[in-house]
C-alpha cells in the first residue's frame, strides 16, 4: 500500500512538472499582441456606406481580444463590439456590421452615414500587455453638404471698375480640430477672408474689375490638409475628398470714356474732316451735333462746310450697349472756322476750256459710291488726313455691311487700295482703285486684287474682274461720310 501511494505521488509530481513545462513553452512561443492594420482617415457623404479596417497579426489569433470604440455618442468613448459581437446597448447598432472573412479580420461597416458618425473610431486588442499593446484609430468626417457657392456676377460680362464678391460655405461633422479648408485663387488684386465653426466653414473673395482680369476667373478649392490628422494613435493619411468652384469667366467691358477729337486745333478751315474718338468696348457708335443750330451728323466724322464759318459749340456723342444697358458719354468743344478766302475774279469771259479726253483726277477727298447687280459700295477718302480711306460694302445676298479700310497714294490722286474683312469662308478681301477724269468726269474703278488682274489702261478699257464685275465709282458732292446710318443709295 505504501508502495502504491509512492507511485501515485510520483506520477502527480511528474504530471505537474510536465504541465508547467508546457505552459512555460506556450508563453515563450506566443507573439506580442497588437493591431497590425488599423482604419484610415476618411471623408464621406450623408447616407453613404464606409468600412473601417482592423486586422490583427496572424500569431495572435488565439489570444487577441479585439474591440471597436467610437467617441461621437459619448466623448469618453462608447464600445461598439467585443470580438465578433456587436453590443446590443449601442444606439447605432442597427447600422453597424462586422466583416470577418479571415481569422485576422475585424472590419467595421457603417451604413446610412449620419452626422453623429463624424467622429473618432478606434480598434484595440485589450489582451495585449501594456508594453506591446497598440490601438489604432481614424477620424471619420461626414460631409453634410457640399460647398454652396455664389457670386454677385450675374453673367460673364462685367464692367471695368465694378465691385464683385464670391463666397462658398459648407457644413460637416467631425471631431474637434478636424475641418475642411477653403482657398481662393484668381487674378490680382483681390481680398480673401475665411472663417469656421465646429460644423461649418466659409470663405469669400472680393475684387474690383480691371481690364487685366479679362478672360480670367476666380476659383475656390475645398479639401483637407494634415491639420487635425496628426494624433499619435491615429492614421496619418489625409482624406482625398475635394471640391472646386469656379466663377464665370470675366469678360471685361466698359462704356465710352477718355473722349477726344482730331484734328485738335484752335481754328479750322472749310473742308476739314473732324473725327471723334472714345475708349469703349464694345466699340461705340457716334453722332455729331451743332449745339447752336441743332444740326446732326450721324457718323463718327463730319466735314466742315461754309455754313459753319464762325464759332460754334460742337458736341460729340458716343454710346454702346453692355448687358442691354446703354452707356454713353459726350465731348463738347468750341470750334472756330475760318472764312473762305475771296479772290478777285476777272471779267466774264465767253471762252470755255474743253476738258481733255483723259486726265488725272483732282483731290480724291470726299464720298464716292457705286453699285452693280451683286453688291453696293461706299467709300470716304480723307486726303487731308494722309489719304485715309474708309467705307462700307454689302453683297446683294447679305443683310449686313462690311467695313472697308485703306489709303490713297498721296500727290498722284489716281491710285489706292483697301481691304474688307468678311465672316465665314470669305475672309480678307483686297481691292485696288484707279481714278481718271474722262472728258472732265471723274470716274474711279475698283477691282478685287487677289482674285483678278485688271487695270484701267484707258477710259475705254476698264477691264473686267473674274469674280465680280468691277465697281465704277462716281463722286457724290456735299454728302456725309459713309456709315450704317447713311448707307450708299
Image (spheres, grey):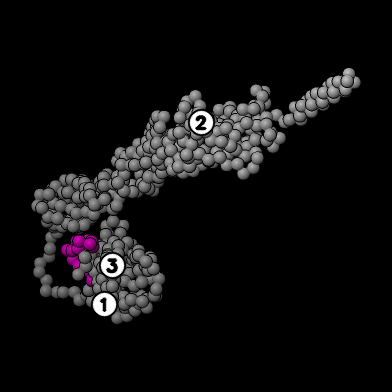
The reply, left or right, for residue 350 in relation to residue 158 is left
Residue that appears at 41% across and 29% down:
198
Residue that appears at 31% across and 57% down:
386
Q: As rendered, which of 174 and 152 lies closer to the eye?
A: 174
Q: As rendered, which of 137 and 181 lies closer to the eye?
A: 137
Residue 211 in view of the camera:
yes
Q: Earlier in the sequence, mark 3 or mark 2?
A: 2
Residue that appears at 77% across and 26% down:
23
Disc 3 element: strand
Q: Which mark is residue 393?
A: 3
* Residue at the extreme front of the image, as rendered: 1
Assess disc 1: are there few (<14), some (14-19) or many (≥20) residues with their C-alpha within 10 Å of its C-alpha. few
Q: Is residue 480 magenta?
A: yes
Residue 44 in view of the camera:
no
Residue that appears at 58% across and 28% down:
233
Disc 2 element: strand
Residue 308 pos. (x, y %)? 13, 54
What residue range appears in magenta?
Answer: 472-486
Mark 3 → mark 2, Cα distance in angstroms: 80 Å
Residue 26 pos. (x, y %)? 76, 29
- Disc 1 target residue: 373
Q: Which mark is residue 70?
A: 2
Looking at the figure, which quarter contains the N terminus?
top right
State which quadrant residue 408 falls in.
bottom left
* Residue at the extreme bottom of the image, as rendered: 460
Assess disc 3: are there few (<14), some (14-19) or many (≥20) residues with their C-alpha within 10 Å of its C-alpha. many
Amino acid at each position: 500500500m505504501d508502495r502504491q501511494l509512492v507511485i501515485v505521488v510520483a506520477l502527480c509530481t511528474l504530471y505537474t512538472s510536465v504541465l508547467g513545462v508546457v505552459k512555460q513553452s506556450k508563453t515563450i512561443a506566443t507573439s506580442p499582441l497588437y493591431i497590425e492594420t488599423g482604419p484610415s482617415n476618411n471623408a464621406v457623404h450623408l447616407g453613404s456606406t464606409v468600412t473601417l479596417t482592423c486586422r490583427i497579426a496572424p500569431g495572435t489569433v488565439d489570444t487577441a481580444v479585439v474591440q471597436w470604440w467610437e467617441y461621437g455618442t459619448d466623448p469618453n468613448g462608447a464600445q461598439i463590439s467585443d470580438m465578433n459581437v456587436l453590443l446590443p446597448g449601442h444606439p447605432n447598432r442597427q447600422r453597424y456590421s462586422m466583416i470577418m472573412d479571415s481569422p485576422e479580420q475585424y472590419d467595421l461597416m457603417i451604413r446610412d452615414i449620419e452626422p453623429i458618425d463624424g467622429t473618432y473610431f478606434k480598434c484595440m486588442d485589450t489582451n495585449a500587455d501594456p508594453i506591446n499593446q497598440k490601438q489604432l484609430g481614424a477620424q471619420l468626417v461626414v460631409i453634410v453638404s457640399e460647398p454652396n457657392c455664389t457670386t454677385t456676377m450675374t453673367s460673364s460680362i462685367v464692367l471695368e471698375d465694378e465691385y464683385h464678391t464670391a463666397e462658398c460655405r459648407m457644413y460637416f461633422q467631425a471631431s474637434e480640430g478636424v475641418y475642411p479648408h477653403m482657398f481662393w485663387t484668381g487674378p490680382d488684386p483681390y481680398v480673401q477672408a475665411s472663417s469656421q465653426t465646429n460644423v461649418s466653414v466659409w470663405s469669400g473673395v472680393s475684387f474690383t474689375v480691371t481690364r487685366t482680369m479679362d478672360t480670367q476667373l476666380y476659383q475656390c478649392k475645398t479639401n483637407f490638409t494634415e491639420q487635425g490628422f496628426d494624433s499619435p494613435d491615429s492614421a496619418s493619411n489625409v482624406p482625398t475628398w475635394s471640391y472646386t468652384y469656379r466663377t464665370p469667366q470675366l469678360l471685361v467691358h466698359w462704356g465710352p470714356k477718355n473722349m477726344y477729337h482730331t484734328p485738335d486745333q484752335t481754328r479750322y478751315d472749310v473742308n476739314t474732316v473732324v473725327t471723334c474718338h472714345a475708349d469703349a468696348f464694345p466699340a461705340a457708335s457716334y453722332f455729331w451735333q451743332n449745339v447752336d443750330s441743332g444740326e446732326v451728323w450721324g457718323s463718327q466724322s463730319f466735314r466742315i462746310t461754309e455754313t459753319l464759318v464762325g464759332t460754334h459749340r460742337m458736341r460729340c456723342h458716343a454710346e454702346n450697349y453692355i448687358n442691354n444697358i446703354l452707356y454713353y458719354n459726350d465731348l463738347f468743344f468750341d470750334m472756330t472756322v475760318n472764312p473762305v478766302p475771296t479772290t478777285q475774279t476777272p471779267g466774264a469771259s465767253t471762252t470755255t476750256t474743253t476738258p481733255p479726253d483723259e486726265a488725272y483726277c483732282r483731290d480724291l477727298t470726299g464720298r464716292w459710291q457705286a453699285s452693280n447687280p451683286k453688291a453696293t459700295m461706299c467709300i470716304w477718302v480723307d486726303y487731308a488726313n494722309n489719304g485715309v480711306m474708309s467705307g462700307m460694302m454689302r453683297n446683294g445676298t447679305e443683310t449686313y455691311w462690311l467695313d472697308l479700310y485703306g489709303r490713297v497714294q498721296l500727290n498722284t490722286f489716281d491710285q489706292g487700295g483697301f481691304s474688307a474683312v468678311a465672316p465665314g469662308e470669305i475672309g480678307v478681301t483686297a481691292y485696288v482703285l484707279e481714278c481718271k477724269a474722262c472728258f472732265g468726269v471723274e470716274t474711279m474703278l475698283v477691282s478685287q486684287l487677289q482674285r483678278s488682274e485688271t487695270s484701267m489702261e484707258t477710259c475705254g478699257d476698264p477691264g473686267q474682274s473674274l469674280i465680280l464685275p468691277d465697281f465704277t465709282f462716281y463722286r457724290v458732292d456735299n454728302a456725309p461720310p459713309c456709315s450704317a446710318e447713311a448707307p450708299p443709295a
